[in-house]
Amino acid sequence: MSASRLRPALGVAFMAVVFGLLVGYPLVELVRAAAEEGWSAIGEALSSGGTAGAVGNTLLVGGAVTVLSVGIATGAALITERAARPGWMRLGMLLPLVIPPFVSALGWAEAYGPAGLVDDWLGVSLPGLFGGFGVVIVITVNAAPLAYLVIAAGLASRTDPDFERAARASGASAIVAFRTVTLPLLRPAVVSAAGIVFVVAVNSFGVPVLLGSPAGFGTMTTHIYRDLALSADPVAFTRVLSLAAGLVVLTLIVVASSDTASWLRGIAVRPGSPQGSAVRSGVARSAMGSLAVYVTLTSLVPLLALLLTALTKAVGLPRTPSNWTLGNFREALDGAGAAFTNSLLLATAAALLAVVLGGAVAALGRRWQGMGTGVVLTFAVPGSALAVAVLLAYGNPFRDTLTIILIAYLAKFWALGHRPIAGSLDNVPPDLYRAARASGASPLTMLRTITVPLLLPAVVAGLVMVFLFAFHELTMSVLLYGPGSETLAVVILNLRQLGDVTVTAAMAVTLTGVVLAAAAILVAVRRVWVR
Amino acid sequence: MSTPALSVSRLEVHYGSTRILHDVSVEVGPGEAVAVLGPSGSGKTTLLYAVAGFVSPSAGTIRLDGAAVADSAFSLPPERRAVGMVFQNYALWPHLPALEIVAYPLRRGGMGRLEARREAARLLDLVGVADLAHRKPAEMSGGQQQRIGLARALARRPQLYLFDEPTAHLDSALRAALQQELVERRRASGAAALYATHDAAEALAVADRVLLLRDGRVIQLGTPNEIYERPADLWSARLTGPAWSVPGVVADGFLEVLGVTMPVDEGVPGGSVDVVIRPDWIVPGVGVSATVTGAWYRGSHTDYRLETGDGPVEMRRVGPVEWRIGERVEVRVERAWPVPSST
């Protein structure tokens, strides 16, 4: 074997070892530990501590969120892709994607909960916000954008406005054309979107722990947290293992049956033809109006409420300028300075490493596709389960350190560093490389002058995406942190559970500010480079 | 006179604040085919979309068989207009096999499932792709897909066909065959057609009349021969075939160009003009002496580039290369067409 063929083979082997250490070994440890307990112990554990109810609640939340999100997303995609396509509309629809779910939950509590903003102004609050109803609503708001991305991409790439025109020219009314042409073409996208949303809903921890737990509404993820972080009972640990393994199995079944993996890989909204409109402008206007109302009520009002709470001196005071103060922010910075540094460090390290690892997998992708699939699938593994698996594998010697949190972040967010680069590599027509070589460029010159400049936007996108998700990560961090390795999200959750509403609001606003700034960079990068 | 199959009068179409079509009027008689010829962005597709009902006019009227289907106030939805459309990108629904695609308009017309399939099979056979009945579009070549697209339009049994650059995505051998199929099927059906294309040879070959569009305005409307021999201006001349221009002078009903004098139509104003000369309008003979600056052998004929002293022209001769580059040759203009001077 010549050296030029040996090197890629070594690369594949090296990446296989890295993948095995980060993902394979922990998951195997989890399954092994669960199996060691034996069926009878698992059965006993599951029938204790309200666990069966938590499993039921999880499935209930997953089902309800899926139905609601897919409905909302389909409607929104039809509005933005067919009726009217202003850019702010899409951004508005995607806004919840960059608001950390637990911040969303805090915002909803401040906006629509008892003594919330709407209660202040109009004297009403949303009944059942604390409990299963609120959990479903807020997760839906957070998950709908993902479904929207998939369905809008499906609408743009799988259906051509000409398909609908051909149906109309064949004698079909608008409704018949939608039923016989648009909907059947969209079905694979809808199924995938449903799969993704279900996985996200089942994964969700921040929302149920903030809105469900206070009302006694537990899910699998909140039970893992309760039993692992707040209990030393051996039966509780068996419950943790069973629930974590169960979550992994549940997720993998859904992902496999809905072909979600191929869609996770394909997420990229491609704009359709600009003349796509067959909808009358009156209909378009009212549809856009309802979308604007939806975005305002679900994202903007909760964020505003959270900001006002963060500015108000104490809980219970009217949120008016006379009661405003910056004291909460000062206190937040004092109390969470170290955690802020930890989050910044972890997110930066995770972003850099995930992009390097992701780029490596993308570069090897043509030789070994399975690796990319494995990386993407790991993203779907619930954070609660992944954290338990990492704890089992590396708890000794890394328990309670930043290192173990970083390992979990890398395993989970590897896909976010991988996908943009792999997608960008796939999208570069090979003729561009051939043209460079035919123009006299050596392989290295080609890499420097053609490949890297073409990949740069994807690298930046990957960096920002990983940073964004790692910076507000709560689910895994709360299971893995120890004294001195708290992240900002962990401090917010702990402080909130102690009841300090105004200071947690200030912390949440600060965290959201950083995340939004990162997201703004991402949008700017797309604008400048992709056009 | 019988009612025109299509009558478009003073049509204006806007996308947002951009005006795409401006004051477009055209009538298509029963059984007549009118080609809409123009470069990309000239408004061809928009004109077809307005007739089909995909865009609404901001002014003007569209009538099908004498009945108004659209004006600035109302627009009949596409499914209620008797038109059959063939799309540039075929627009075959990827989730259906060919038989179901062709049966689709029949089903919408209220035909039973079995009967619609029988009729669809007959139409597939008619356009020569009966063997593809159970394949989906992804498993077909472009030429096969467009035959299915044609069969779908035929199934609608319309009064008017709309062809939106139906052969643009096909390579040249397939293009000729499909073009022939479109013309024959359309003629046999007896229906009229509006045929958008950016290819002059195609427009001249398939149509009874040609409509020249530029920036959403009608530049010229006439028979293919009129369009070719009597272009409205230099731009039209170049759009409709190879054309060169040299300076000339019109005086007392005669045109002087490249050493010859020939009569011109009444009403052509006197003075300096640009004179359109097509390669088949110039022959070897006594007139003007020119130098051969290029020669392209094209199999059935050879094109020569000639420098006349008044500017370059091209001459087309049947057969292989007779004159070499640099040779001097005496040529005579047999036909010429003066257009308003562009300077």
Image: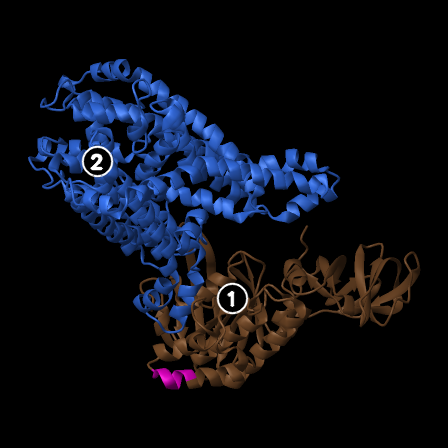
Chain colours: A blue, B brown
The span picked out in magenta is: B111-117
Residue B284: name its quadrant: bottom right
Q: Amino acid at mark 1?
A: Ala
Can residue A316 be seen at all in this image of the molecule?
A: yes
Residue at 50% in and 44% down: A371
Neighbourhood count class around disc 2 (C-alpha, 10 Å): few under 14, some 14–19, many 20 upward = many
Residue linked to disc 2: A236
Let me know if residue B127 is in the magenta part.
Answer: no
Name the magenta segment's main secondary structure.
helix
Let me know if residue B114 is in the magenta part.
Answer: yes
Residue A451: name its quadrant: top right
Neighbourhood count class around disc 1 (C-alpha, 10 Å): few under 14, some 14–19, many 20 upward = few
Q: Is residue A20 above or below residue B69?
A: above
Residue linked to disc 1: B138
Can residue B190 be seen at all in this image of the molecule?
A: no
- Mark 1 or mark 2, which is nearer to you? 2
Q: Is residue A457 above or below residue B189?
A: above
Q: Position of residue A291 (x, y in %)?
A: 27, 47
